[in-house]
Image: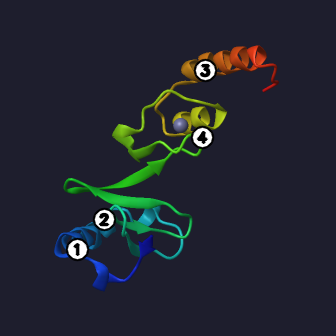
Amino acid sequence: MLTTDISRMCFREQQEASKLLLNYRHIYDQTDGKVTLQMNENSGYVFLSDEEHNVWMMNGNRIEKWYSCPGCRHEGFKEEMEHDPNNAECESFLFDLGLITEEDKYEVEEWLKEIGQKLGMVI
Ligand SMILES: [Zn+2]
């Protein structure tokens, strides 16, 4: 459950919110449209989000973009985003992030084709 109601934040979450606002200046030119401060009430994560559903959180003392792989929902900061691609969406996501090279991409495509053929699918 996401909320923008800061009265629902405990002190730790308020501190996290303060850090995000203080560091917003480092990412404001990466944001698209309205930017809101939000909290996930289940996880206690506090973050900034824009209209394109981009998310930024504090990674220690640095504000960093929080990624979610569209192919498999793997989540994390960039340093945590390296994962084995499960499908073509994972693969192009990893390529766009610069975590795999053109060569890796080719290998993965070949591998996906091979798997696809085994399963009788055409990719
Ligand atoms: Zn993925």
Q: Type of residue at label 2? A: Gly
Q: How is the image coloured?
A: rainbow
Image location of residue 114, percent across then percent down? 71, 14
The image shows residue 38, relative to residue 106, as above or below, that is below
Picture quadrant where residue 36 is located: bottom left
Q: Which residue is mark 3?
A: 108
Distance in Å between CA atoms under marks 2 and 3: 36 Å
Describe the element under mark 3 as helix, strand or loop: helix
> Is the residue indicated by label 4 positioned so its CB lies within 8 Å of ligand 1?
yes
Looking at the rendered structure, which numbered label has been put on residue 71? 4
Describe the element under mark 4 as helix, strand or loop: loop
Q: Are marks 2 and 1 in contact (CB under 8 Å)?
A: no
Q: What quarter of the picture does the C terminus occupy?
A: top right
Residue neighbourhood size for the residue with mark 2, other residues' Cα within 10 Å, grouped as few (<14), some (14–19), many (≥20): some
Residue neighbourhood size for the residue with mark 1, other residues' Cα within 10 Å, grouped as few (<14), some (14–19), many (≥20): some
Distance in Å between CA atoms under marks 2 and 4: 25 Å
Residue 38 shown left or right of residue 115 in the figure:
left
Residue neighbourhood size for the residue with mark 4, other residues' Cα within 10 Å, grouped as few (<14), some (14–19), many (≥20): some
Q: Are marks 2 and 4 in contact (CB under 8 Å)?
A: no
Q: Type of residue at label 1? A: Ser
Q: Nearer the viewer, mark 2 or mark 1?
A: 2
Q: Which residue is mark 1?
A: 18
Q: Nearer the viewer, mark 2 or mark 4?
A: 2
Q: Type of residue at label 4? A: Gly
Q: Are marks 3 and 1 in contact (CB under 8 Å)?
A: no
Distance in Å between CA atoms under marks 4 and 1: 33 Å
Distance in Å between CA atoms under marks 3 and 4: 14 Å
In primary-sequence order, the first of circles 2 and 1 is 1
Residue 99 shown left or right of residue 110 in the figure:
left
The image shows residue 37, relative to residue 109, as above or below, that is below
Q: Nearer the viewer, mark 3 or mark 4?
A: 4
Looking at the rendered structure, which numbered label has been put on residue 44? 2
